[in-house]
Amino acid sequence: MSIIENYPISRVPDMARLSFLSVTLVHAGMLTALDQFMLGAVLGHSMTLNNAFIAIFAGSVIFGIVTFALGYAGMKEGLSSSLLSRWCGFGRVGSLFVSLVIAVSLLGWFGVQNAVFAKGLNYALNDRFGFAWSATLSGLFLTVLVAFGFKALRFTARIAVPLFIAVIVIVSILILTGHNSGELVNALPSGPPMSLAAGITMVVGGCIVASLITPDMSRYSKNGRHVFWMTIISIIIGEFVINGLAILLARAVNSADVVSIMAETAGDIGLLVVVFSTLRVNDINLYSSSLGIANSFSAITGKKVNFSAITLTLGCLGTALSFAGILDRFVDFLTLLGVVFPPLLGVMLVDYFVLKTSRKQLYISRLMGELPQCTNTLRIGWTAIFSCIVGSIVGFTIDWGVPALNSILAASFFYGVIVSLFKNKKSRKA
């Protein structure tokens, strides 16, 4: 696959669809990463074991449902998340809202992951270059890698995903050896206490961006069965295996700073975890962020834009976030994502599967391998945007329940009711 075959503003044709393994490795790579390990460590350090796994299970259920549903839509239409949002309530210009939210959040993730990469690199080099130069070198390297498109993602995923899982198991064995398993299971959390609702929201925040950008990968899938099993495998490996091990490690070392612990305790093996996890996930972050900006530029100007140029620009911005200190705000970042992102998913899923406002246009254009005509596409979906804002406000202000679930339900309900009322009003007039 060459650079021009990233399909940033077009459908992925049937002849360009990839094997189940190729797409699944890329998708699973988003959840088999050091940021998931860090999340598990925070849960293990601040919650009882039962509550930590309840939070993982509940968050995984929310993640699994919305990820499969949106991933199926992306596979069916062959469209990226940013493009799909045009015909899922947001409209041609309104999709800029989705694209920019995706791009900004993924730049944040890029900054977090690159800071982790730089921290490990700086440790390996005995602080020879300093954190700032290490962050710059690692950020530019990943940026150049992503400029080669999805082919580079597949190549790194095939190497990095299996190696990361193997290394993480070895590191866990090294650190857990000599600890009593019963004591680890029954030990009380030593960190600042965290409620179950907050834990679930953090779990959702850690994976909700992966839900929204799943169509960026599932558009290369061949059928819905592939999307379903891709989702299940990602959940099992990322949420239960990676997070589960991190919970036990946090209890074993009585700390949530797993990055430093692995580098100092496991030596070169620990540093391999840092390097390969960030290498594999950050290319996805930058890839999907570039797709979002490409859609934004297309929606405004109606023209195509050079994918590599976007990637290089965003890579530099993400690298700047690394040495600006975004890693220090990791928990706050996850909580914010866990409330702001679910409403976007709720609106898109309600529009595509329930209201079906643009399904006829999508079906006809899909038969021709094209996008729906601009003249038949909603210009800006104010109802969708307003529903997302309402959902986010509900998530931030309502104290009872789970904020992530509250926000997605509020946005979905509000959007469904408003659009249905307008439809009924138009029908009566007609």
Image (spheres, rainbow, N blue to C red):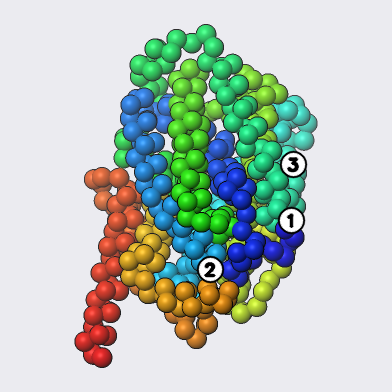
Residue 297 location (% of width, % of height): 61, 72
Q: Amino acid at mark 1?
A: Phe
Q: Amino acid at mark 2?
A: Leu
Mark 1 — residue? 148
Viewer-closest of 239 and 411 = 239
Q: Residue at x 67, y 55 (%)?
A: 150
Q: Residue at x 26, y 74 (%)?
A: 420
Viewer-closest of 130 and 421 = 421
Secondary element at tag 2: helix
Q: Residues within 10 Å of mark 1 (few under 14, many from 20)?
A: some
Residue 41 seen in this snapshot: no
| 3D distance between C-alphas at marks 3 and 1 | 24 Å
Q: Residue at x 51, y 31 (%)?
A: 242
Position above or below: 300 against 145: below
Quadrant assignment, res 197: top left
Q: Residue at x 48, y 45 (%)?
A: 229
Secondary element at tag 1: loop
Quadrant of image for the C terminus: bottom left
